[in-house]
Image (spheres, rainbow, N blue to C red):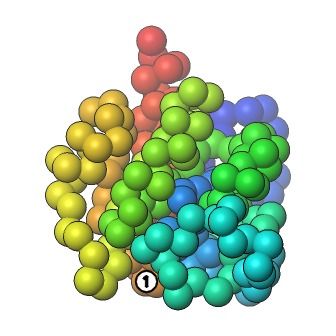
Amino acid sequence: MASVGSDPGTGDAGIPLAVKLLVAGGFGAGKTTLVGAVSEITPLSTEEVMTEASLGVDDLAGVEQKTTTTVALDFGRITVDDDIVLYLFGTPGQGRFWFMWDELAQGALGSVVLADTRRLDTCFPAVDFFEHRDIPFVIAVNRFDGSDDYTEAEVREATDVRPDVPIIMADARSRESGKEVLLTLVEHVMRRRSLAMSG
């Protein structure tokens, strides 16, 4: 696991290697929920009550009951072992806050893209964002009660991602499910780095 960071001086002298990961996806996909479920600390959240200012701006189709929204970021931490600590940054989902994604992506080794089974198309901008910046990502399909149940093949076809991009079914409310998603991402990052070094 310590091989995730190959920069000189990282993880030395008993200091854990800090790994920055993003949690992205569409509005209401479960990003804040996922960060809160897996974080070992009380997560920092910039959720605010939605106001009339969002009417006609934020697309609430499929998430009409949502009353709060992330306006900057979510932040959480999870210690993998003595050598690695993951720092999670959840991105805002609405289009009007996407300008922050470039800032949040600085120094990130990879990202989880949460796909909402009620509105699968809302994950497409996040997929495009990470593909164009060559940032490794996995797609975590967050299954919501009463929503369509897509197969991995259907999600892969809809998102048109490369065959090597992992797609995993998940429940953002579950700590164990969230940890499995993060482990899948870290393994994907390591595989890509290994291939790049050997190539």
Residue 136 at what x, y percent from top left? 52, 38
Where residue 16 sits, quadrant-wise, is bottom right
In the displayed structure image, the side of residue 135 where residue 61 appears, left or right: left
Dot 1, crowdedness within 10 Å: few (<14), some or many (≥20)?
A: some
Residue at 46 percent of width and 84 percent of height: 173
Residue at 54 percent of width and 57 percent of height: 25
Residue at 57 percent of width and 83 percent of height: 66
> Viewer-proximal residue, 41 or 7?
41
Where residue 8 sits, quadrant-wise, is top right
Disc 1 element = loop
Residue at 32 percent of width and 35 percent of height: 160
Above or below, 122 against 63 in this view is above
Number of on-image labels: 1
Residue 11 at what x, y percent from top left? 74, 49
Residue 103 appearing in the image:
yes
Above or below, 3 against 82 in this view is above
Where residue 22 sits, quadrant-wise, is bottom right
Q: Residue furthest top?
A: 199
Quadrant of the snapshot with the C terminus: top left
> Viewer-proximal residue, 44 or 57?
57
Residue 142 at what x, y percent from top left? 38, 69
Identify the residue under disc 1. 174
In the displayed structure image, the side of residue 144 where residue 97 appears, left or right: right
> Viewer-proximal residue, 41 or 94?
94
Residue 19 appearing in the image:
no
Which residue type does callout 1 highlight?
Ser
In the displayed structure image, the side of residue 196 where residue 12 appears, left or right: right
Residue 194 at what x, y percent from top left? 47, 28
In the displayed structure image, the side of residue 107 where residue 165 appears, left or right: left
Q: Residue furthest front?
A: 56
